[in-house]
Image: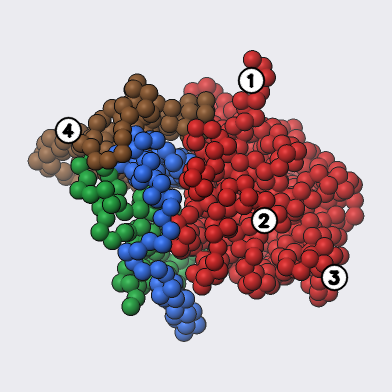
């Protein structure tokens, strides 16, 4: 139907890795540089949109199952992080300034930005990144994989 | 003198509402709602600006005088909400085209028929 | 009928124009107590350099939870609609 | 350790009530591999847990005043670190726990009902997940004390109910109804957001109580008030923009119509919160009160007159939902109109508000019952058109009796709960302005007329050949109907208890503006 030429397919293969790295960089550095879970998740979703367009005929059936499970896992991880803070209050940042995982204390003022800071926020960024990535690719898949519903 | 930012917001909102009022095509209605929501995002961001300040990110920041962070957080939330609304509306538009063959609202069956 | 819509739209435009006239000047926010608190204590309390992310995820975490659920609801809505549209809804 | 765990849950109650439906909604789609009915059992279980938590929360609110909870603070009661409410604060007073209790009970009954109603369809995990998200959105809107948070939960509610309205996606009408609903919801949400931006631009605050304290009644506040009132009136289905109500309730599955009634009423609560707490002392509140009264009157009248010629049973009930919303707007609008002079307020203002708010819970119950009964008819006969039904009375006797209870209660006849709240509204509104009360009575009579038509065309009359083998609806679907009918009769026979227990503290909480603001500022 849409004869996607070989060049497009090869370029698509090449592009997968840089876009993935850039997307996860934006997600993981949400607390240091602009961006975060939402922007990074959207970047990764463009990856899926590109793959759907180029390899549309090779899909035997619509792979939305994997994305709906991934979406639920992302959201459950996010709300469980909020529940873990219940020792003091619902959305409490229980990892900050404890020198554990992401616990390095940060003082007021300009600093070059250390990755191991900001307690729960990087974990929440990852959870939201997974959720946004799978929600957007689910929507892209649903809108693009035409089912050919009967026309009245 | 009137601030050019708030004037642009007002013009964009009225453009968005006029597309909603006058257009019959579904995709144009979705575009109208998108215009209104982007103009409200512009309004939120322009409320948060402080003269001579930089973005509120302390990594290698040129100065410590910073812009207000809350409007940016509100705009972040609003952008994702409008993404969700547009996604749902466009998928409804796909199905409406599927059943009625046209995207214009003239052929809708749910008009108030008291027959 | 079209004239009535144009008139109401013009009224709404004037109604909005008043907001842009009456709003405070562009670059000078009036009470910034809350935002200065975020800028001063953002790094110490939440540890993140990006104050907007600390506001989004820590100070106003419920908004982001609500927003992620909005996206989850949209994706579920789209999935629900296309599944029903495909299977034709016969009592399968 | 037992007391520790007990106090632990009690201390985090307001946040748990919103978080548990969300967690359940995210887990629901994963239960597909545990069998076909795992999802419905899971959602019924979670909704009943939330119902118990809301009851405990309501008890605590009535016992020792407003409960507040700062989300994310090191101690839940650390509301404003340096005099300014920095975090999102959940503030639960009597009116929000009243609305929360009403909404969660109706959604729980709708979920029990849809466990059997949805058995025919294959993959319905996402349906239950969206229903739980609707519950979470309503709880969030009821309990939050933050303007922007209320906007976000309004969006969660709108998008999940839009997805549910389009459930019968193989029919073109349901897609239209969902599209219309989504356009109206997103426009009203954008107007709410524009008003929040106006208020934030001036005061730099987002908390309702802090905004209420920092008010200077500038021209921008009046514009923000106008935008907020029009947005929430649009969302609760009152007249000027009620076109979406008939389509949305008519085309959605029956349990969803019942929960949509409650979803519109939570926008009514938001309207009252805006008018009483945020803009309580504004001198222009009289004009707004008169607008609300006129919207109420128009909704009453237009709702009933549009319901007369309807052929589709659910569209007819949808129009009656519009007209009943008019009663609530009339009741509380009268209370708002006389909020400033104390003697008029004590004479009839508080009584009018009690009638309006008592009508909210009554309407939620009998409208829920009527929609579920309509769903039962459609479940058995498969048709929504009144002309094709006939003589179902002797085939489905229990459903007929239940429909009769709902019908008599919506028209406000003595032994049922509709009468209790409508009588209070008639008396108090008559003292304020006799014409309003006369219109309210006429509308009740017209409601009776249109429902008699429904009863005769659906349950009595000559029998249709097609529906010879129609049986009674299964037991699981009957349980919520019987519970609703029992509650209707209970509230009808003993209105005093419900008034004293639930409605009077709610009205006091709504009028007690200083108490609500004092918690935070």
The residue depicted at 68 percent of the width and 36 percent of the height is D57
- Which residue position holds label 2? D513
Q: In this view, does D237 lie above or below B8?
A: above
Chain shown in red: D
Which image quadrant is residue A114 in? top left
The residue identified by callout 3 is D431
Q: Is mark 3 on a helix, strand or loop?
A: helix
In the rendering, what colour is chain C? blue
- Do circles 1 and 3 both sit on a common chain? yes
Residues marked 1 and 3 touching at CB (< 8 Å): no
Q: In which quarter of the image is the N terminus of chain D?
A: top right
The spot of residue C82 in percent (x, y) is 43, 44
Position in image of residue A3 (x %, y %): 16, 45
Q: Nearer the viewer, residue D47 or D87?
A: D87
Q: Subunit of mark 4?
A: A
Q: Which residue lies furthest to the top in this view?
A: D1
Label 2 environment density (alpha carbons within 10 Å; few <14, some 14–19, many ≥20): many
Earlier residue among tags 3 and 2:
3
Assess whether mark 2 and mark 3 are in contact (beta carbons under 8 angstroms): no
Q: How far across and how far down the image is residue D100, in percent?
A: 66, 44
- At mark 1, the secondary structure is helix
> Which residue is under mark 1?
D4
Q: Are marks 3 and 4 in contact (CB under 8 Å)?
A: no
> Colour in which chain A is shown?
brown
Helix, strand, or loop for circle 2?
helix
Residue depth check, mark 3 versus mark 2: number of the one nearer the observer: 2
Kindly report which numbered mark, 3 or 4, lies closer to the viewer in this rendering.
Answer: 3
* Residue identified by numbered label 4: A17
C-alpha span from label 1 to label 2:
34 Å
Nearest to the observer: residue D41 or residue B74:
B74
Identify the residue at image location x=62%, y=31%: D11
CA gap, disc 1 and disc 3: 53 Å
């Amino acid at each position: 139907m849409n004869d996607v030429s070989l060049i497009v397919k090869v370029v698509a293969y090449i592009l997968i890795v840089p876009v993935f790295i850039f997307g996860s960089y934006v997600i993981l550095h949400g607390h240091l540089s602009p961006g975060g879970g939402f922007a990074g998740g959207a970047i990764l979703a463009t990856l899926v949109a590109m793959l759907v367009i180029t390899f549309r005929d090779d899909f035997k059936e619509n792979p939305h199952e994997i994305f709906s499970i991934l979406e639920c896992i992302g959201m459950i991880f996010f709300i469980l992080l909020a529940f873990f803070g219940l020792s003091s209050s619902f959305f409490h940042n229980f990892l900050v300034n404890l020198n554990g995982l992401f616990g390095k204390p940060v003082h007021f003022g300009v600093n070059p930005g250390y990755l191991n800071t900001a307690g729960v926020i990087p974990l929440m960024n990852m959870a939201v990144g997974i959720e946004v990535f799978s929600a957007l690719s689910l929507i892209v898949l649903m809108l693009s994989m035409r089912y050919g519903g009967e026309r009245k | 003198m009137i601030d050019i930012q708030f004037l642009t917001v007002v013009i964009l909102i009225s453009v968005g509402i006029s597309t909603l009022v006058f257009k019959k095509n579904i995709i144009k209605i979705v575009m109208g709602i998108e215009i209104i929501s982007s103009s409200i995002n512009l309004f939120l961001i322009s409320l948060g600006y402080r003269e001579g300040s930089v973005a509120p990110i302390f990594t290698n920041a040129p100065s410590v005088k910073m812009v207000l962070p809350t409007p940016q957080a509100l705009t972040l939330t609003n952008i994702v909400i409008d993404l969700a609304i547009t996604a749902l509306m466009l998928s409804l538009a796909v199905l409406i085209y599927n059943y009625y063959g046209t995207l214009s609202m003239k052929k809708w069956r749910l008009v108030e028929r008291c027959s | 009928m079209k004239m009535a819509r144009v008139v109401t739209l013009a009224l709404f435009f004037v109604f909005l124009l008043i907001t842009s006239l009456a709003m405070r000047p562009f670059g000078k926010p009036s009470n910034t107590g809350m935002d200065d608190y975020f800028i001063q204590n953002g790094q110490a309390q939440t540890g993140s350099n990006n104050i907007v992310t600390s506001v989004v995820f820590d100070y106003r975490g419920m908004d982001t939870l609500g927003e992620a659920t909005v996206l989850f609801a949209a994706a579920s809505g789209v999935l629900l609609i296309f599944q029903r549209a495909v299977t034709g809804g016969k009592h399968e | 350790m037992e007391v520790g765990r007990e106090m632990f849950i009690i201390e985090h109650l307001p946040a748990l009530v919103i978080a548990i439906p969300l967690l359940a909604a995210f887990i629901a789609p994963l239960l597909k591999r545990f069998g076909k009915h795992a999802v419905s059992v899971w959602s019924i279980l979670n909704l009943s847990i939330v119902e118990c938590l809301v009851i405990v929360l309501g008890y605590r609110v009535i016992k020792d005043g407003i409960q507040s909870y700062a989300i994310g603070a090191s101690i839940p009661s650390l509301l404003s670190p340096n005099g300014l409410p920095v975090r999102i604060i959940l503030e639960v007073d009597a009116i929000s726990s009243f609305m929360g209790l009403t909404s969660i009970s109706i959604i729980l009954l709708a979920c029990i009902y849809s466990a059997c109603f949805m058995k025919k369809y294959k993959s319905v995990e996402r349906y239950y997940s969206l229903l739980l998200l609707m519950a979470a959105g309503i709880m969030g809107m009821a309990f939050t004390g933050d303007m922007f948070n209320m906007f976000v939960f309004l969006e969660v509610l709108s998008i999940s109910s839009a997805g549910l309205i389009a459930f019968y996606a193989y029919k073109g009408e349901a897609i239209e109804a969902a599209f219309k609903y989504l356009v109206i919801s997103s426009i009203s949400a954008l107007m709410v957001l524009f008003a929040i931006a106006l208020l934030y631009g001036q005061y730099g605050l987002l908390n309702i109580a802090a905004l209420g304290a920092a008010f200077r009644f500038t021209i921008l506040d009046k514009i923000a008030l106008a935008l907020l009132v029009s947005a929430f009136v649009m969302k609760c289905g009152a007249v000027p923009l009620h076109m979406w109500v008939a389509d949305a309730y008519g085309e959605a599955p029956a349990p969803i119509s019942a929960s949509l009634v409650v979803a519109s009423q939570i926008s009514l609560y938001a309207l009252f919160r805006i008018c009483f707490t945020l803009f309580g002392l504004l001198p222009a509140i009289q004009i707004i009160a008169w607008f609300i009264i006129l919207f109420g009157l128009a909704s009453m009248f237009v709702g009933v007159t549009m319901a007369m010629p309807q052929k589709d049973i659910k569209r007819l009930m949808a129009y009656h939902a519009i007209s009943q919303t008019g009663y609530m707007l009339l009741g509380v609008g009268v209370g708002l109109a006389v909020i400033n002079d104390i003697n008029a307020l004590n004479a009839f203002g508080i009584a009018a508000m009690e009638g309006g708010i008592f009508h909210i819970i009554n309407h939620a119950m009998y409208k829920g019952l009527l929609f579920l009964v309509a769903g039962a008819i459609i479940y058995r006969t498969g048709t929504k058109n009144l002309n094709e039904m006939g003589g179902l009375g002797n085939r489905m006797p229990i459903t007929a009796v239940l429909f009769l209870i709902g019908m008599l209660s919506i028209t406000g006849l003595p032994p049922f709960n509709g009468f209790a709240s409508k009588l209070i509204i008639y008396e108090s509104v008559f003292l304020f302005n006799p014409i309003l009360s006369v219109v309210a009575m006429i509308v009740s009579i017209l409601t009776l007329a249109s429902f008699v038509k429904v009863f005769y065309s659906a349950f009595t009359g000559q029998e249709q050949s097609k529906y010879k083998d129609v049986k009674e609806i299964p037991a699981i679907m009957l349980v919520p109907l019987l519970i609703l009918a029992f509650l209707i009769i209970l509230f009808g026979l003993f209105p005093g208890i419900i008034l004293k227990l639930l409605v009077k503290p709610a009205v006091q909480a709504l009028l007690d503006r200083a108490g609500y603001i004092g918690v935070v500022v």
